[in-house]
Structure formats: structure tokens, C-alpha cells
Image (tube, rainbow, N blue to C red):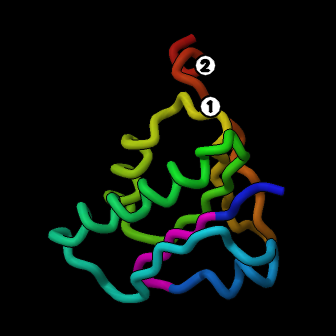
Amino acid sequence: MAKIIVIEIGKSIVGAVIRHLGKPYAVVSYPREVHMSEFKKILKEAYEKITDACSNNDEVWIILSGPLALVFQLGQLIGLDNKNIKVLQYYNGEYHIVPDVSKDELVK
């Protein structure tokens, strides 16, 4: 089974994740509005939990709720090359793995 990491900023989603997918491996939780000055601290915490989860080459599922700019920065830190990481999206009452995309696919 994949290791589930929940990153929730502003709105708490961990309860829904537990109901649908089970107990997460790790949670980064700031269930309040955060200031941009906090982004670096939050990114560090999230990045450390993600890299820890990936340490044994396990599949990692990331479920995110938070400011788009912070989520984008986290994506930049992780990059496109880690194929063991999957992002999940809540849609029509359940979580779905978002299909992988590569730079090559986008420039054809």
C-alpha cells in the first residue's frame, strides 16, 4: 500500500482522507490562514515528510489542500522526475490518482 501524505493549509481534509483511504503516513497541518512569511517553514516540513516517505522507494500518495502558490512551490521542489510520487484529487465523492505528465508530452 502507498504511503499517504496529507498537506492541509487553511481547510482540514485529513478526516475525509482517513474515511476514504485510511490513516496517513504523515500530515502537515495548518488549519488556518497562513501568511506568506510562513511558506518556507511549511515547505520545509512538507518536503522532509515527502522525502522520508520516499526513502525506501515506496509509492507515495500526496493529497493537498492549500494556497496555490505554496502548492506550486512544493511541486518545484519535488520536480517531475520522481515517479514514485502520485498526487490525488478529490472528485465525485472519491480520491483519484492524477495521471502523470512529462515535459516531452507537452512540447510535442
- Up the image or down, 10 lies above or below 47; here it is below
Q: Residue at x 68, y 63 (%)?
A: 4
The residue where tag 2 is placed is 105
Mark 2: secondary structure: helix
Q: Amino acid at mark 1?
A: Val
- In the picture, the quarter occupied by the C terminus is top right
Taking the magenta stretch, the answer to whether it contains residue 88 is no
In x, y percent, where is residue 17?
71, 77
Q: Amino acid at mark 2?
A: Glu
Residue 21 in which image quadrant = bottom right
Are the residues at dot 2 and dot 1 in contact (C-beta closer than 8 Å)? Answer: yes
Nearer to me, 4 or 94? 4
| Left or right of 19, for residue 45 | left
The residue where tag 1 is placed is 101
In x, y percent, where is residue 93?
80, 75
Magenta-drawn segment: 5-11
Characterize the magenta stretch by its predominant secondary structure.
Answer: strand
Nearer to me, 18 or 88? 18
